[in-house]
Image (cartoon, rainbow, N blue to C red):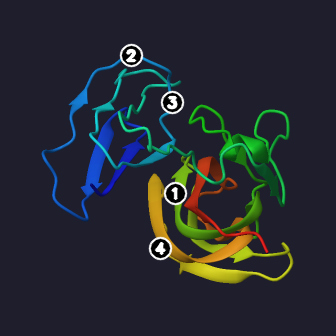
Amino acid sequence: MGRIAIAFTQADRAQVDEGSTGSTTGAPIVRQEPSVPVRPTSSLRARLLGALTVGVLLAAGLAGPVGVALASSADAVVTPALSQGRTATASSAQDRVYFPPSAAVDGSTGTRWSSAPSDDEWLQVDLGASASVTSVVLRWEAAYARGFKIQVSDDAVTWTTLYTTTTGTGGTQTLAVSGSGRYVRMLGTARATGYGYSLWEMQVDGDWLPST
């Protein structure tokens, strides 16, 4: 059986996507199943060699944990986003008590980072080790970036740009990227409002690279 990806969205719904690489005996089962909660911003992936049961608990209106993924295979592997709970830093913060950089990588859409009101601001996360980065999800508050870049670095000094735009839309932006590094940052270049930049979450997904 192929890979099953379960993505929890801010709208309290679950989307199940099956990328099968061989024959299957049937589609995954989605059903209500109370169990250990998982925050809605988590990205979960399970590699299954045996039968699969996927259970998702939906709790509309809750700002906190809303779902759980269950796999019957003993080989199932479930991983959070690479960025979740890692060290985040920023060029500035509107208020480092209420809107710190760490709030953008804590797995909660109830906390956020907000920058000072200028165009040249950034938020970066130290993944702790080098990783192949395949996706960056930005969950903007109303104060979003019209222009920004997504960059990676091995040393937080020299940066490689993986994505750039001057027509940012705000809301939730899921960006497919390709690159590797230990540090990932959102570099703002143009604000869409008179305020700074404000992110509920900056979620980095991908795979860890072998240590050398």
For label 1, the crowd category at 10 Å Cα-Cα, with few meaning under 14, some 14 to 19 and many 20 or more, is some
User: Residue 33 versus residue 153: which sits nearer the camera?
Assistant: 33
Pick whichever of labels 1 and 2 is earlier in the sequence. 2
In three-dimensional space, the C-alpha distance between marks 2 and 4, rounded to whole angstroms, equals 41 Å
- Please identify, in this view, whether the residue under mark 3 or under mark 1 is nearer the observer: 3
Where residue 129 sits: x, y (%)?
A: 76, 63
Amino acid at pointer 2: Pro
Q: Which residue is mark 2?
A: 34
Pick whichever of labels 3 and 1 is earlier in the sequence. 3
Q: Verify CB contact (< 8 Å) between mark 4 and mark 1.
A: no
Q: Which residue is mark 4?
A: 167
Left or right of 170, for residue 97: right
Amino acid at pointer 1: Val
User: Residue 81 versus residue 208: which sits nearer the camera?
Assistant: 208
Please report the residue visible at 66 percent of the width from the left and 69 percent of the height from the top: 209
Looking at the rendering, which quadrant does residue 89 occupy?
A: bottom right
Pick whichever of labels 2 and 4 is earlier in the sequence. 2
Q: Which residue is mark 1?
A: 137
